[in-house]
Every structure is written in structure tokens, then in C-alpha cells.
Image: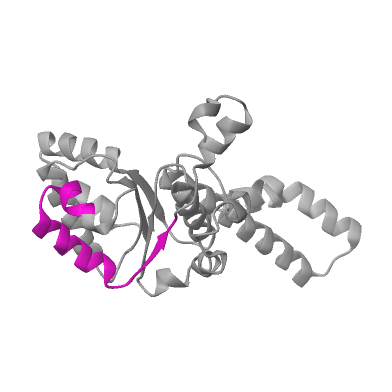
Amino acid sequence: MMKDMLIERLQKLGWHHTAHQLDHLLEDASRDNVSYSEFLNTIVLQEMEYQESQQLEKRMKRAKLPYIKTIHDFDFSFQPSISEKRVKETLTCRFIANGEIRILLGPPGVGKTHLAISVAIEAITQGYTALFVTAGDLVAECRKANEKGTLQRLVNRWSRPDVLIIDEVGYFPFDELTANVFFQVISKRYEQGVMILTSNKTYLEWGKVFGDDVLATAILDRLLHHAITFNIKGDSYRLREKKKAGLYPAQLSN
């Protein structure tokens, strides 16, 4: 009767994991003759660890990462143009507290998205919220929100997470609507919300990306104020794997 009442009270507190494990915990405590303080410490610690793991899982799910890859999967020897030391400094996530931005520039396939996801995973692990959006998603969602009259709600959603990752900026031009929404998001997050951007275009080409040199200048002015740029000039990982598998014509690889 007392145990049933205790389980009920634990569930009311939201300690569902401890409630489900109570029989096992009581048996262990009785068998090992642990003290009251040790028993209390055990159940509090287990519940904390469980709730933290649940919160981590929720943050990972909400981040909408396209895949999971950590920095341990990144081959720095294949991309000598990028500083492993600077990347690992970014992975400490101190840049988030400082309100800084990270921009990864380089041709397709050199690992920009991989690095952005690696930093996002580390940030999520440290308790920050993140959201991953491709430039294609940006365009599609802006058009959909414009039709529904919910553009401001979309701007607010992209302004909310601690870290916003926008992937593939420049792979195709933004329309006027998306360019203006992008500027609004940049402005709302300026010096407050951290961003990680990847792009295959140099900054000089961003005027074409946004269809407006003045707007591109205004965007870059806000982005670069507190930003570190990583220029990756190596070969494509995907191309390397195709060559290894014999799927890439020899005459084109020379």
C-alpha cells in the first residue's frame, strides 16, 4: 500500500522513470544495506540522468538534422586547407555564448555540411537548441507561409533556436520574398542568436544569390561583424569515394 502510494506520488512529480524502477531500486537497497542518504542520492541521480537523456533526444529531434556525423568522422588529412585547431575551438561552443557566427565556404562535397552538423550536435549535447534548414527549405517554406499569411510566424520560428544552421546558401538564387525573409531573420538574430552557414559562393557572388547587391551588402554587414569564415579548398569527398569504387571515369579524374 505504501509503495503504491509512493509510486503514485513519484508519477505526479513527473518522475516516471523512478516510479517504474522503484521495485528494482528498493530490492538493491535492501540487499546492499545502503544508507538512506545513499539511496536518496541514487534515485535522484538516476532520474536526473534519465530526464537529461530525454531532453537531449527531444533537442536532437527538433533540430531536424539530415544525418548524424560527428567531428570524429571528418578526415582533416584530406582537407588540409581547413585548420583542425580552429574547428575544435568552435566545437567548444564558446562562440555561442559570445554570439558569434561561423560561415563555411567551399565547393560542393568538401565537408561543409558535415562540419556544420558536427558543431550542431556538440551544441545540442551541451544543452543548446538548434535547427537545421537548407536554402531549398528556406525558399519552399517562405512561399508556403506567404500563401497562408504566416510569414512573421516563420521568421519567429527561425529566430528562436540558440543555433540556426542554414545549409547550401548560393546553390541557386533566392527569390525576392526569400531574400527579404532571410534578411529579417539575420536582423532578429544579430548579436543574439548564433548562426552557422554553408555556401559554395564567395562573398563577392552573394549579390547574385540574393538578387540585390544592396541587400547582400546589408546581410553580409550583419553576418561578418562577429563571424569566422572557414574557406575549404580541397577535393570532393563524394568524388573520392566514387573514384575508389571505380564509378568515376578515369579520363575525367585526371
Viewer-proximal residue among 90 and 121? 90
Side of 144 relative to 91 (left or right)? left
**Number of numbered discs on residues:** 0
Q: Is residue 244 visible?
A: yes
User: Taking 89 as reference, is 39 left or right?
Assistant: right
- Between 181 and 224, the one lying in front of the other is 224
Q: Residue at x 10, y 40 (%)?
A: 149
Residue drawn where x is 22% and y is 67% of the image:
222
| Residue 162 belongs to magenta span | no
Residue at coordinates 30% horizontally, 50% vertically from top-left? 201
Residue 183 location, x and y as percent? 17, 56
- Dominant secondary-structure state across the stretch colored magenta: helix
Residue 33 lies in what quarter of the image?
bottom right
The residue lying toward the viewer, choosing from 103 and 144, is: 103
Q: Quadrant of residue 139?
A: top left
Please report the bounds of the magenta region as a residue range.
205-232
- Residue 146, image x and y in percent? 12, 38
Residue 231 drawn in magenta: yes
Residue 244 as seen in the image, left or right of residue 254 = right
* Location of residue 175 in the rendering, given as x and y in whole percent from the top left corner: 14, 41
**Visible residue check, residue 7:** no
Q: Is residue 118 above or below residue 217?
A: above
Q: How is the image coloured?
A: one colour
Question: Considering depth in this image, is 229 or 6 the residue closer to the camera?
Answer: 229
Query: At which x and y percent is residue 37?
Result: 75, 72
Q: Residue at 68% x, 58% y: name it.
A: 46
Q: Residue furthest bottom?
A: 98
Picture quadrant of residue 145: top left
Horizontally, is 253 left or right of 132 in the view? right
